[in-house]
Structures are given as C-alpha cells and as structure tokens.
Amino acid sequence: MADTDTLAKERELRNLYFASFGFITDAALDDKRLTQEDAKFITDGVAQHLSRYDGALTEDGFERWVLDIIKPAVAFYGLKRECGPYVRAAIRRKLGYSDQFDDYRAVAEELESEVWIWALLHLEELAIPGTASLRTRLYKRAQWMVRAYLKKQYIRFNMISQFASDGRTICVEHLSAKELASMRADAMETE
C-alpha cells in the first residue's frame, strides 16, 4: 500500500511539474541576465528535486515551493552571467599564458569552476552589500585562487628540482604530505 501511495505521489508531482513548467521557466527568466540555457538548467534542477517536495499537492503550494528553491539558483546564474567575464579576466591575468606546468585552458577552466563553487557556497554572504562590488569581490577571489594554485605548482616544481640536483630518483608524481594524507583518508572511506 505504501508503494502505491509513493508512486501516486510521484506521479502527481510530475504532473504538477509539467503543469507548472511555464511558470518555472518564467520565474527563472524573470532575471533579465539569464538565458534560455540557464532557465533549462534551473527547470531541470527542479525536476531532480521533486522528491523533496512535502507540501500539499496543489498547483499553488507547488509553485510557492518552486519559487523558494529556485531563488538561489536564479541568483547564482545571474551572478555568473554578470561577473563571469571578470572572473575569467582575473584568472587569465594572474595565471598568464604559460603552460609551464599544465594545460593552460584546463587549468583556467578548473580555477574558474573553483571560484563558482566558492561563490555558490557563499551566496548569502555575497548578497550582503559590501564596500566592494560583487565583480570586485569575485575578481579578487579568482586572483587569490590563482595565486594559491601557482604557489602549489612552484613548490612542487622546486621540490622536484631539489630531488634532481641531489641525484635522487624522480617519480612521475611527487605529492606533498598533505596530499598523501588526503589520499589515505579517501582510500579509508572507500574500503
């Protein structure tokens, strides 16, 4: 009986989702910075979280819930659209155009992803007006992440250079003690 109730609720939620699809898309596109592609990601995200809806199975209640859950997504995608060029510029300027350590494009994309993950995790803090604009705060965060990346790469490069100058065997990859500890912890979790 419980399985039948669960299936009926899932079916009703899917029906509510499809009935409200235009509402969800319009709510996502209410922020003029967002594109149709952004709206699609948001509507897909709502579909993935239907099981979290625990309100009344009415269109009105469902749409209120949708507005509550898409607000952060709309804010995030708007922030990404508005500040994305500044984040990429900060990464390019600080990283330079050298592929001394890695593939430049892949590193730049990874660093940009890290900035956006940080922004998503700190969305509420970023919403509080500060003395610096959002663009400036994200620009500085991107610079900080590039600086941390470069520092790590230079330390690793110097360690390998030291090994070579001491006549020690150089392995394909030398990891720091912190990286080895992290790998050990990950291995323990998977066992």
Image (tube, grey):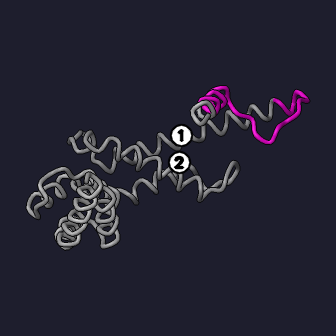
Kindly tell me whether residue 30 is visible in this rendering.
Answer: no
- Residue 152 lies left or right of residue 158; in this view the side is left
Amino acid type, residue under disc 2 in the picture:
Lys
Query: Residue 185's image quarter?
Result: top right
Residue 72, how many percent across, how many down?
25, 51
- Residue pushed farthest left? 60
Quarter of the figure with the C terminus: top right
Query: Residue 7's image quarter?
Result: bottom left
**Highlighted magenta segment, given as a residue range:** 163-185
Residue 104, how many percent across, how many down?
62, 56
- Say which residue appears at 35% left-offset and 42% top-offset: 121
Residue 135, how many percent across, how many down?
32, 51
- Say which residue appears at 17% left-offset and 57% top-offset: 67
Label 2: how many Cα within 10 Å (few below 14, some 14–19, many 20+) = some
Name which of mark 1 and mark 2 comes first in the sequence.
2
Seen from the viewer's position, the closer of residues 126 and 188 is 188
Q: Residue at label 2?
A: 94
Residue 147, how many percent across, how many down?
53, 40
Query: Residue 159's image quarter?
Result: top right
Amino acid type, residue under disc 1 in the picture:
Arg
Q: Is residue 182 magenta?
A: yes
Q: Residue at label 1?
A: 147
Q: Give the vertical position of 132 relative to 29 (above or below).
A: above
The numbered disc on residue 114 is none
- Say which residue appears at 53% left-offset and 48% top-offset: 94
Kindly tell me whether residue 6 is visible in this rendering.
Answer: yes
Q: Is residue 146 magenta?
A: no
- Say which residue appears at 64% left-offset and 29% top-offset: 184
Cβ atoms at labels 1 and 2 below 8 Å apart: yes
